[in-house]
Image (cartoon, grey):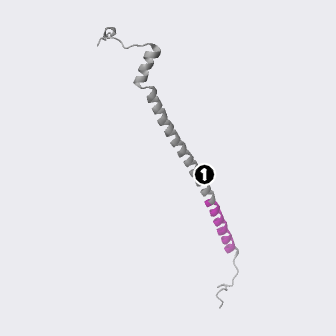
Amino acid sequence: MNRFQPLHKRPLTAGQLLLIALLWVAAIASALAVVASTQVVRRDINELETLRREASQLQVQWGQYLLEQSTWAAYSRVEHAAVSELNMTAPTPDDIVMVRGEVN
């Protein structure tokens, strides 16, 4: 017996051919689904990295804004602006008036 000859000489039935065709279609559909899901994952990973870069840039900007805010709100700067731009002065002890509220 030649080792390359089929073990059975019967032709395949219509049901067997249909099963083989369905298995081929299922294999191709599965392969296409893998390709599609891989593409979706790659797109989502790209978007995630873009958002991570943007978040990092926003963190840097937030730090810069906090530094700028602390600079503008520094006591010495506010005091200098009050004296030089608004001609304000610190009150003398004679200018200070104590007000007491009534407690019920």
Q: Percent from the top left, x then y, of residue 101?
A: 31, 11
Which residue has dot 1 on it? Answer: 43
Is 27 magenta? The answer is yes
Q: Please determine whether, in this image, residue 66 is positioned above or below residue 47.
A: above
- Name the residue rendered at 49%, 33% in the picture: 65
Q: Nearer the viewer, residue 17 or 33?
A: 33
Please, what secondary structure does the residue beneath circle 1 have? helix
- On screen, residue 23 versus residue 89, left or right, reads right
Count of marks placed on residues: 1
Q: Percent from the top left, x then y, of residue 70?
A: 44, 29
Is 46 magenta? The answer is no
Q: Please determine whether, in this image, residue 85 is positioned above or below residue 24.
A: above
- On screen, residue 54 versus residue 17, left or right, reads left
- Name the residue rendered at 66%, 89% in the picture: 2
- Name the residue rendered at 60%, 51% in the picture: 43
- Name the residue rendered at 64%, 87% in the picture: 3
Tell me which secondary structure the magenta stretch mostly adopts. Answer: helix
Residue stretch in magenta: 15-34
In the rendered image, the residue lying farthest to the top is: 94
Q: Quadrant of the C terminus?
A: top left
Q: Percent from the top left, x then y, of residue 102?
A: 30, 11
Q: Nearer the viewer, residue 41 or 22?
A: 41
- Binning the other alpha carbons within 10 Å of mark 1 as few (below 14), some (14 to 19) or many (20 upward) gives few
Q: Amino acid at mark 1?
A: Arg
Q: Percent from the top left, x then y, of residue 1?
A: 65, 91
Q: Please determine whether, in this image, residue 55 is positioned above or below residue 70.
A: below
Residue 25 lies in quadrant:
bottom right
Q: Nearer the viewer, residue 30 or 58?
A: 58
